[in-house]
Image: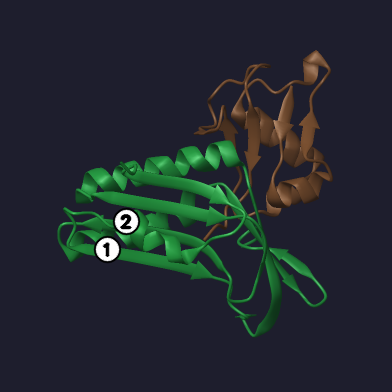
Chain colours: A green, B brown
Amino acid sequence: MVDKKVIEIVDRIDTSQVFSELSDAQSGGICVFVGTVREFTQGEEVVSLEFETYKKMAIKEMDKIASDAVEKWSLNKVIIRHAIGLKKVEEPVVVVGASSAHRDACFEACRYLIDTLKETVPIWKKEMFENKTVWVSAHP
Amino acid sequence: MEVLLFGIAKDIVGESQLQFTESDKVPSSVSELKRMISETYPEFGKLTSLAVAVNSEYAEDNVPLDRNDEIAIIPPVSGG
């Protein structure tokens, strides 16, 4: 029996796992969002991103988001997995997904999962450029 | 009292923890902690937002602080 919710902070994300983790006999739809490292930010070339977290709190906040989504959209399964450490261009850094009886629920839930994660979960991203580093969103 | 620091907060202070030792200078609430660190390190005042977690939950300004609490400064988050 696989858990209904998968909440994890890992060093490296394997995106091939997620289908079997969300697959479910009661679900007619699975929706997944993968966030990856983009090469250019406002015209500047990013060498890599570095993520750090306050893990204990991040897991709690991710669990709240997942529980809220399960309740709101009657999801059968939900996953929130975020990577930390140094990530290169094109590497996956976050995977969120949901499975539900019909597709509308998992599409909406998936957007809620990633949008809320970005607002509340204590994870910080540092952009490393050729000659400087910037903590994302730190300054207005 | 120990306060955990992450992200840009760690860079501003230059340490991963802040220590409040003298009893008359230990912050008694979230708002007092915010005021004290912003006075000592004016860079905190330039951030988009500044939150505090008490026992790994976001805490409002009026929440009292106890020496045994796990307290953390939460600068603007940027996961995803």
Give percent across and percent down for residue A89: 63, 76
Residue drawn at 15 percent across, 61 percent down: A102
Q: Nearer the viewer, residue B19 or A74?
A: A74
The quarter of the picture where the C terminus of chain A appears is bottom right
Seen in the picture, residue B24 relative to A45 is either above or below; the reply is above
Q: Nearer the viewer, residue A107 or B31?
A: A107
Q: Nearer the viewer, residue A8 or A67?
A: A8
Is label 2 in a helix, a strand or a loop? helix
Q: Is residue A129 visible?
A: yes
Is label 1 in a helix, a strand or a loop? strand
Residue corresponding to mark 2: A22
Marks 1 and 2, how far apart in space?
Answer: 7 Å
Give percent across and percent down for residue B43: 76, 51
Q: Is residue A112 visible?
A: no
Q: Are marks 1 and 2 in contact (CB under 8 Å)?
A: yes
Q: Relative to A126, is A107 on the left or the right?
A: left
Q: Relative to B27, is A68 on the left or the right?
A: left
* Disc 1 residue type (three-letter): Ile
* Disc 2 residue type (three-letter): Leu
Total marks in image: 2
Residue A57 is drawn in which quadrant?
top right
Residue corresponding to mark 1: A30
- Chain containing the residue with disc 2: A
Seen in the picture, residue A59 relative to A135 is either above or below; the reply is above
Q: Residue furthest bottom?
A: A43
Seen in the picture, residue A11 relative to B31 is either above or below; the reply is below
